[in-house]
Image (cartoon, helix red, strand yellow):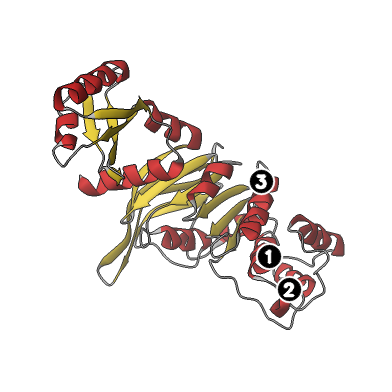
Amino acid sequence: MTAAIVIDRLTKRYRGTSAISDLSLEVPVGSIVGFLGPNGAGKTTTLKILAGLARATSGTASVNGIAVSAQGAHRAQVGYLAQEPRFYGWMSGRETLRYVASFFEAPKAAQIDSWLELVGLTDAADRPTRTYSGGMRQRLGIAQALAGDPSVLLLDEPAAALDPLGRHDVLEIMQRLRGDKTIFYSTHILDDVQRVSDHIAIVDHGRLVTSAATSELVRASTRGTLRVSLLDADGSTAAALAALPGVGDVSQPERRDGEWSYDLTIFDGQIAAVQRAVTRLAGETGLTVTTNRQATLDLEDVFLRIVDKERAA
């Protein structure tokens, strides 16, 4: 089996509004997949359907070949972390894990100890969870998601609202689980995705926009992009750049202290030719070129470009 999760034309409607629409996606076994999209894109709804907490209006999904259904046979395959996990404040971390694990089978003390060690809560294991920080609660949430020994983890914004140290701790846990578990998680923190995710799936308005290996998506977007910065440009400059042979698209300019910067999408193999054309254009129009090079984009640049392009279509 190459896909731990298979989603096929999944749709969920609430009172006439589609939260997700004809969503199809595969999540490779053993991978960490970042599930990205603007607010309201359908990420949480998708995760809840996979966890068995919501029913799809139409379409199908499976986890490790077991159909996601109201009967919930697939639930033994998944562990789920909600965006804001809640625990009984009077229970300790150890008691919380013992309680959650009891729904699956009588947990052994060594198992609970191993979960606590994995998420870095050994020293706080016997403290009431009401004394835990936000980062500690998130880490305990990941531990409870592991309680049934699932092969797939569904994490909804696991690092949301955490400080940099808390985010680092959560990402470190995900790294430790790489290969042993399949992790499908939603997030808005694109730097984190670029650090830990093997694959990326982007949704907008409930529809899949793109799905690819993280490195390939960034590389492909960067390969055909030229960053151009000009002094004394104006509102007509973007149109002049877009008219150059080999240019497919021009981004909205960034303006700072008289310098206008543009990202030009270039057709395959024409970077050098367009660079020369930009230099000629500047000479003919009295502009000064300060930057004319192939761009280095990060995932945030790529994400914004993909979503903006989708919405403009």
Q: Earlier in the sequence, mark 2 or mark 1?
A: 2
Sort mark 1 into few (<14), some (14-19) or many (20+) by Cα contacts within 10 Å.
many
Is residue 103 toward the left or the right of residue 235 in the image? Answer: right
The x, y position of residue 136, in whole percent, is 69, 67
The quadrant of the image that shows the N terminus is: top right
The quadrant of the image that shows the C terminus is: top left
Decide which of 235, 182 is in the foreground and name it: 235
Sort mark 3 into few (<14), some (14-19) or many (20+) by Cα contacts within 10 Å.
some
User: What's the CA distance linking mark 2 and mark 3?
Assistant: 24 Å
Residue 259 visible (yes or no):
yes
Residue 9 visible (yes or no):
no
The x, y position of residue 79, in whole percent, is 61, 59
Measuring 50% from the left and 33% from the top, which residue is drawn there? 215
Indicate the secondary structure of the residue bearing disc 3.
helix
Measuring 28% from the left and 47% from the top, which residue is drawn there? 308
Q: Is residue 21 above or below residue 86?
A: above
**Residue denoted by label 3:** 175
Please state which amino acid type lies under the numbered disc 1: Gln
Is residue 124 toward the left or the right of residue 272 in the image? Answer: right
Q: Is residue 245 above or below residue 73?
A: above
Asked whether the residues under the numbered discs 2 and 1 touch, taking CB atoms below 8 Å apart as contact, a structural biologist would say: yes
**Residue denoted by label 2:** 96
In the picture as drawn, the residue positioned furthest to the bottom comes out as 90
- Point out the frontmost of discs 3 and 1: 3
Indicate the secondary structure of the residue bearing disc 2.
helix
**Residue denoted by label 1:** 144
Please state which amino acid type lies under the numbered disc 3: Gln
